[in-house]
Amino acid sequence: MGEGKHSVHLPFRALKIMETPSVEGVYAIAIGVDGELCRLDDQWKPIEKHARPFPMSIQHAIVVDEHLIATWIDRELMIARMGCLPIDEPFKEGVERGDLRKTRFVEHAILPAGAIWAHVLDAEPLAMTNMDDGFAFVLWNRGVYAFDVTGVERWRAPPPEWPELANLPMSQETVELFETDTTIEVWSRAGGCLRLSKSNGSQIGTGHFDLDGSLSNVYGSTSVRLLLLSNGRCYLYHGGDKVADLSTQGPIQHALCIDDSTWILSGWREEILLEQSGVKTQKQNEVVVQHILKGEQLWLLTNDGMLHHSILTE
């Protein structure tokens, strides 16, 4: 599908588009595969030229009011950063990757350009989520942390553990955080779920789900959890009961909840509509990265940097 009324070509290949309802004049931001950032208007057009504040890919990103909280990681250079960028002004271009090789000492560390605050991380960030007016994240072998939007720590909890899953591979590796009204759920790759209090990080409970593969992502609402596996399998639970078990062509990149019984899955070269009445698929030539509901219109983002109208629900 070429660019036209029902399609838009972004200035780079995008990993994710995040809506920014608190920022006047900015509808969303696009995040590129190489760490590019671009503010978009309500027609998906760039507001100004995109920038790359830090010369590596963005691992995690969330929007908190008028701020983008992100982590950057380069495993080859063994460098990780966390920072807060303002969304109500243009993003700033940062240094080149080669400059990072010249500054190996923490006191001379280069930080993301234009950051309100930023930290050098001494451990890999594994997961991040919004938490009320702040956010929570997990660092490998360090623990779970809750910060406010100014970068001030609210609480920390020990590294999550699931002793009952110790005999399973990757059972102690955190893969996702999920926010509920009162808790933060910490999910392990083997299906363990540890619930922490949002107020102080204390452990409230733990449990696990039997999975036929490794967990890659968790979506949901008050009483619903959609578990996505790395092999393309997905499980839908209502109130703890499994109500759907679906195998797809490959890893699912994103899930969009229309209501508790209707989900749109961004599949491997396919769109998937999961409803109580059954499953509907729409083939695509490219890998589907994300679905976005803009008003009444469903859009799909593909890995070639194109946004298209989706006909999946028509």
Image (cartoon, rainbow, N blue to C red):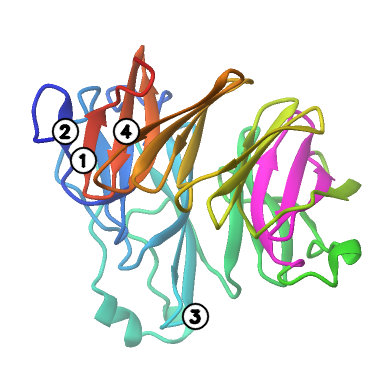
Residue 124, horizontal then vertical, whole percent: 58, 70
Q: Is residue 102 left or right of residue 80?
A: left
Identify the image quadrant of residue 284: top left
Disc 2 and disc 1: Cα gap in Å?
A: 6 Å
Asked if the residue under mark 1 is in contact with the one under mark 2, i.e. CB atoms within 8 Å, the reply is yes
Of 283 and 298, which appears nearest the observer? 283
Side (left or right) of 70 relative to 236: left
- Which residue, given by chain and number where applicable, does mark 3 sit on? 106
* On screen, residue 149 above or below 4: below
Numbered range of the magenta stretch? 171-198
Q: Secondary structure at mark 4?
A: strand
Please tell me the numbered disc located at residue 8. Answer: 2
Pinpoint residue 216: horizontal percent, then vertical percent: 59, 54
Disc 2 is placed on an element classified as strand
- Name the amino acid, label 3: Val
Whether residue 115 sits left or right of residue 243 in the image: it is left
Q: CA distance from mark 2 to mark 4?
A: 10 Å
Mark 3 crowd level (few <14, some 14–19, many ≥20, 10 Å Cα): few
Camera-nearest label, 2 or 4 = 4
Crowding near the residue tagged with mark 1, few <14, some 14–19, many ≥20 C-alpha atoms within 10 Å: many
